[in-house]
Image: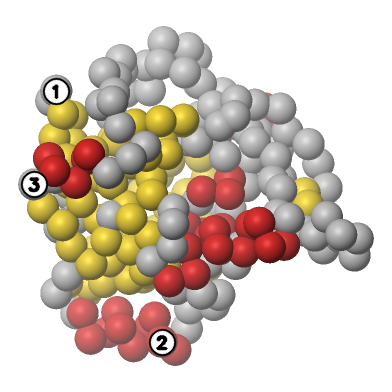
């Protein structure tokens, strides 16, 4: 079974661009954003991909991805994907034996830059580059599947606030699934608040605060 073990961080400044080895345009959308079975369509450069992700256990998720004709991916993105499409440039940056994927978002999510690093195990120690900032692995706002319906460009305007889930730090035990009330959104359920605060989650989840060819 394919597993993805990944941590996500905000990015500080622009020095990372000077050390990036590759970059590629990415366009993606979702056929399903169900928390237990996310189905994603993506074009990466001249290639197309169909991906499926399961619910998260700690920072680990089941993930399957298959290359498909790029034309098919384009047609699915235009015909079947709901919400805004994710447009971003992905950069690859190598640092001390780890490959970092830095996503610089465009369109409705312009201004957001995040870095992801894939690990071999959940407690693997990480020596972060100096341009890596706050960890947002457990913050559901930064999931691409949520950015299609609640894009970054609208957060301030709509006063969007979302709870944050607990995410184990390197060296700690993984969270059990029963400790995670909502695996995709980290326990935060989007609701429409008619007051000036805008959309807010109806539960509070305690936790930390918290753009190349496809690797």
On the image, the x and y values in percent for residue 99 come to 18, 36
CA gap, disc 2 and disc 3: 31 Å
Give the quarter of the image for residue 61: top left
Horizontal side of residue 125 vs 35, given as left or right: left
- In this orientation, which residue lies closer to the viewer: 182 or 129? 129
- Tag in front: 2 or 3: 3
Q: Residue at x 32, y 52 (%)?
A: 103
Dot 2 and dot 3 residues touching (CB under 8 Å): no
Instruction: Name the disc covering residue 78, or none.
Output: 2
- Residue for point 38% across, 45% down: 114
Q: Nearer the viewer, mark 2 or mark 1?
A: 1
Name which of mark 1 and mark 3 comes first in the sequence.
3
Q: Is residue 110 above or below residue 21?
A: below
Q: Secondary structure at mark 3?
A: loop
Locate residue 2, reporting x and y percent.
30, 43
Q: Earlier in the sequence, mark 2 or mark 1?
A: 2
Residue 37 vertical placement versus 167 (above, below) = below
Which residue corresponds to the image point at 29% horizontal and 79% vertical from the top-left?
A: 73
Q: CA distance from mark 2 to mark 1?
A: 39 Å
For residue 68, side relative to residue 53 (left or right): left
Q: Colour mode? A: secondary structure
Q: Secondary structure at mark 2?
A: helix
Give the number of the disc on residue 96.
Answer: 1
Residue topped by disc 3: 21
Q: Tell me, yes or no, if residue 8 can be seen here.
A: no
Image height of 23 relative to 29, above or below? above
* Residue 76: mark: none
Name the element at disc 1. Answer: loop
């Amino acid at each position: 079974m394919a597993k993805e073990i990944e941590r996500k961080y905000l990015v500080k400044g622009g020095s990372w661009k000077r050390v990036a080895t590759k970059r590629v345009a990415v366009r993606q959308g979702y056929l399903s954003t169900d928390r237990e079975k996310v189905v994603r369509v993506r074009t990466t450069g001249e290639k197309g991909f169909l991906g499926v992700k399961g619910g998260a256990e700690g920072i680990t998720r089941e993930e399957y991805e298959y290359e498909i004709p790029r034309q098919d991916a384009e047609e699915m993105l235009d015909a079947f994907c709901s919400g805004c499409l994710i447009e971003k440039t992905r950069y690859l940056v190598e640092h001390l034996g780890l490959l970092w994927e830095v996503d610089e978002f465009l369109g409705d999510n312009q201004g957001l830059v995040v870095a992801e690093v894939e690990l071999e195990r959940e407690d693997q120690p990480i020596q972060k580059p100096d341009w890596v900032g706050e960890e947002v692995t457990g913050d559901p706002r930064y999931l691409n599947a949520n950015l299609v319906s609640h894009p970054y460009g609208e957060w301030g305007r709509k006063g969007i606030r979302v709870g944050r889930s607990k995410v184990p730090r390197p060296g700690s035990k993984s969270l059990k699934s029963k400790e995670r009330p909502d695996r995709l959104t980290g326990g935060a359920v989007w609701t429409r608040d008619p007051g000036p605060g805008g959309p807010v989650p109806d539960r509070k989840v305690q936790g930390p605060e918290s753009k190349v060819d496809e690797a």
